[in-house]
Structure formats: C-alpha cells, structure tokens
Amino acid sequence: MIPLLAQQSIQTKIKLQSVTMLGNYEFYYAAGRICQSLDLLPQSDLPPKELYEFLRVHTDGTEISDPATAHLVKMIHFYIPEEAYDEQMKELFRLGIQERKQ
C-alpha cells in the first residue's frame, strides 16, 4: 500500500461527503487526523478494534466544530475494523497526526 493513496482517498471522501471507508489503511490515516484535530493521544500501537473503541468512546456525543473532523468521525462510526494490522497502518496513523489542520 502506498500511503499517499490512503491519504488522497480520505481527503476525497471528505470533499464528497462519502462515509464508506475501504479498509484499515484508510481507517488508521483518518484516526490519526481525528486524534490530531481533537488533541487525543491514544496508547501507541493500538490494534484496529482497540483504536476504534478508543475513538468511539472519545467522540460519541461530542460536538465537533471542524466540518472535516466531524465527517471523519462519522466515517469511523460507520466503519467495522478488520483484524489486519501492520507497519504501514502505524505509519498512516502517524501521517494523520502530523498533518496540519486545514
């Protein structure tokens, strides 16, 4: 997986208001962006289901003023994480966290 593909896919989905996330690569990048935007700091190296639960707990019922972040949270809530977890997912999460707020 080329990280740029997951990044571009998520950015396009935000613009188009799509809620369909296609796999854990997109999930980890989106999760990183959410954590960056909401100043969340999950335990490092969380597997998919644990990261999903962390995000769900910290975003359920939360009023989010940034439209892009609000849409990412909506996408995450519709997503069912897969078991697969690898180094590229960790890298995509890191890239999401490092991305500047738009």
Image (cartoon, helix red, strand yellow):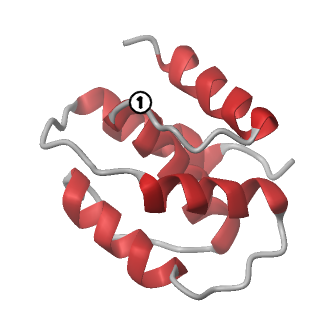
Give coordinates of residue 10: x percent, y percent: 61, 33
- Which residue extends farthest left? 83
- The residue depicted at 65 percent of the width and 22 percent of the height is 8
Give the position of the N terminus as an image quadrant.
Answer: top left
Among the 4 quarters of the image, the one containing residue 24: top left
Q: Amino acid at mark 1?
A: Leu
Give coordinates of residue 18: x percent, y percent: 65, 38
Q: Which residue is mark 1?
A: 22
On screen, residue 53 versus residue 8, left or right, reads: left
Give coordinates of residue 55: x percent, y percent: 43, 70
- Say which element carries label 1: loop
- Which residue extends farthest top? 2
Give coordinates of residue 53: x percent, y percent: 30, 72
- The residue depicted at 40 percent of the width and 83 percent of the height is 57
Depth check, front residue: 73 or 91: 73
- The residue depicted at 71 percent of the width and 64 percent of the height is 70
Q: In this picture, is 87 found above or below 32?
A: above
